[in-house]
Amino acid sequence: MLGIADAGCKEKAVITNSPVHDVDIESAFRQLTCLGLPLQPSEVFATLDQTFQCAPDPRTSTRMLNVLAKAHSVDMSFHVLSWHKMHKYELNSYHYNVVINSCAKANMWIQALQLVSEMSQTKLESDKVTFSAAISACEKAGQWAKALQLFAAMVQNEVDLDTIAFATVISACEKGSRWEHALQMFSKSSLSMVRLDAISCNATISACEKGSMWEKSVRIFGEMAYTKVEMDVITFNSLISACGKGGKWEKVLQMFRVMEHSKVESGTLTYNTAMSACQKRGEWAKALQLLSAMFQNEVELDTISFNTTMSACDEANEWEKALQLFSLTAQNMLKSDTVTFNTAIGACMQSAETKSAFQLITAMGASGLELSTITFNTGISACAQHGEWENAMQLFNAMMQDKVESDAITSSALISTFEKGSEWKRALHFLCSMTSSEAKIDTIACNAAISACEKIGE
């Protein structure tokens, strides 16, 4: 990953035989950038041999590796290390640390681990900088198990543990959805007398949130308050999400109030997460209150904000409010997505506004959104409630024309429509056609067909 190639490089810099100093480092750097890609070790070695007529002192090597690190030239740094080893020039822990840190930034975790292993083999001391950089490389690559192994090696080698080491390994566990390990690291920090920062605590709360362990998230939050660790929007978002997943909407609103009291600004994600928790527990009125607060506090609203509150109202049979919210999406210049339309169509179904449902389906197709099985099922179910079998058949034909896969719900809803419209022949015909085509049918569809026949004594 060489990101320093100089396209304007026309000729090699002139190298003098003067003692090694900063000018020589810059000269070597410019000359190395003139090498073609892919890099050839022999060319790098020859360039360095020209520059350094004798062994560079450790400080000079350090400066050279730092220059390459700032240029994000990890590959070149490896060649420089190899050149030192080839000539048996002195290398120390700091040299390796610079390259390992570069590997971490470049997401090269395998190379970082190789260097750590090489240090052990050459009896070079690995310090907390070495391990923290290597753990960071593993954390960014999602290698939580490797990060834990490195942390264990730190303990075994009696390397001083600090906030960075704990924060990085906890973050690795969080990304790997390993909340148990994240909690263990959190507890070990107290035993090691290391005070964790907001990043470490937030990662632990997030890990518990991913594991649906809301109580443990609240406990971590309590410890943050006790130890006076500064809380930010990430802290509260993770905590609110954890409580929401646990179905604790009351706790969600409580944390929301604590957030306001702490003067931490609530953003769109915060409100959406809180509204989602209320929606899942059927608290549609609370969801509407939160949406209203977004308007009042001038928090940016997005499609998810409206979709969540619309779903909350629709699921609670508050179809009028759901349709009002649908109108507001357009007024707020927000683009409606599939969820928005499907929810609005469902609201129309409840209000017997089948004509409006048809119009929404048409508008949905015209807007370029994909009409899904859920979309058609919702519309057909709306027709079924009111016995409008002609409209139901129109939707089903459109469904087949658009090559949208039907399911058992589709069949049941359509046959139910025929049953309510006393169209027993159509019900039987459709049931037979579904059976012959191996389409999905269920007991409800069969019962609806039987009921249609019973109504006319067939």
Image (spheres, rainbow, N blue to C red):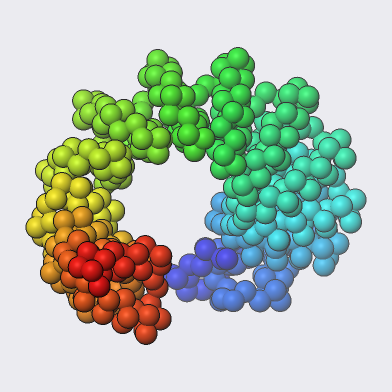
Q: Quadrant of the C terminus?
A: bottom left
Q: Nearer the viewer, residue 291 or 450?
A: 450
Q: Quadrant of residue 451?
A: bottom left
Q: Nearer the viewer, residue 183 or 232?
A: 183
Looking at the image, can residue 91 be seen?
no
Looking at the image, which residue is at 68% across and 34% down? Answer: 183
Does residue 412 sit above or below 20 in this rendering? Answer: below
Q: Quadrant of residue 74?
A: bottom right
Rendered location of residue 81, percent (x, y): 74, 61
Q: Quadrant of the N terminus?
A: bottom right
Residue most toward the bottom? 436
Looking at the image, which residue is at 66% across and 76% down? Answer: 40
Q: Nearer the viewer, residue 394 or 109?
A: 394
Q: Nearer the viewer, residue 449 or 119?
A: 449
Residue most toward the front? 457
Left or right, 157 with reference to 82? right
Rendered location of residue 276, percent (x, y): 38, 38
